[in-house]
Image (spheres, helix red, strand yellow):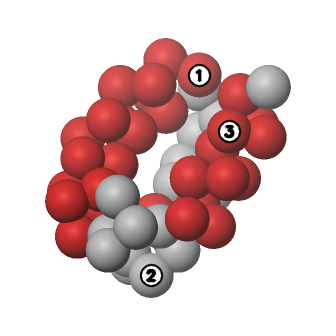
Amino acid sequence: MTAIGFVTRTIHGGFSGKLKLLPIAPTSTSYLTAINPAILRPISASSPKA
């Protein structure tokens, strides 16, 4: 489930260079959980579909 949600978020916000760093990052659930909100908030604000 986490992987599917992560892929969906990556595709949705793929235009952001910051998201490209996430797949390289350690696959730590706590790490992704901590960093995703910080990255997704600016993406949602920038996304015209938000």
Q: Residue 35: x percent and y percent?
A: 35, 37
Q: Quadrant of residue 38?
A: top left
Compared across the picture, whether 4 is left or right of 36 comes to right
Q: Residue 15: x percent and y percent?
A: 45, 81
Residue displayed at 59% across by 39% down: 26
Compared across the picture, whether 15 is left or right of 37 comes to right
Q: Amino acid at mark 3?
A: Gly
How many neighbours does mark 3 have within 10 angstroms: few (below 14), some (14-19), or many (20 or more)? few
Q: Residue 16: x percent and y percent?
A: 38, 75
Name the N-terminal-most of marks 3 and 2.
3
Q: Amino acid at mark 2?
A: Phe
Which SS class for mark 2?
A: loop
Question: Furthest-top residue in view?
Answer: 30
Name the N-terminal-most of marks 3 and 1.
3
Q: Quadrant of residue 44?
A: bottom left
Q: What residue sits right under mark 1 in the picture?
A: 29
Q: What residue sits right under mark 2 in the picture?
A: 15
- Residue 39 appears in the rendering: no
Q: Which mark is residue 5?
A: 3
Name the N-terminal-most of marks 1 and 2.
2
Q: Which mark is residue 18?
A: none
Residue displayed at 55% across by 65% down: 12
How many neighbours does mark 2 have within 10 angstroms: few (below 14), some (14-19), or many (20 or more)? few
Q: Amino acid at mark 1?
A: Thr
Which SS class for mark 1?
A: helix
Circles 3 and 1: CB atoms closer than 8 Å: no
Q: Residue 37: x percent and y percent?
A: 32, 35
Q: CA distance from mark 3 to mark 1?
A: 12 Å
The quadrant of the image that shows the C terminus is bottom left
Compared across the picture, whether 11 is left or right of 36 comes to right
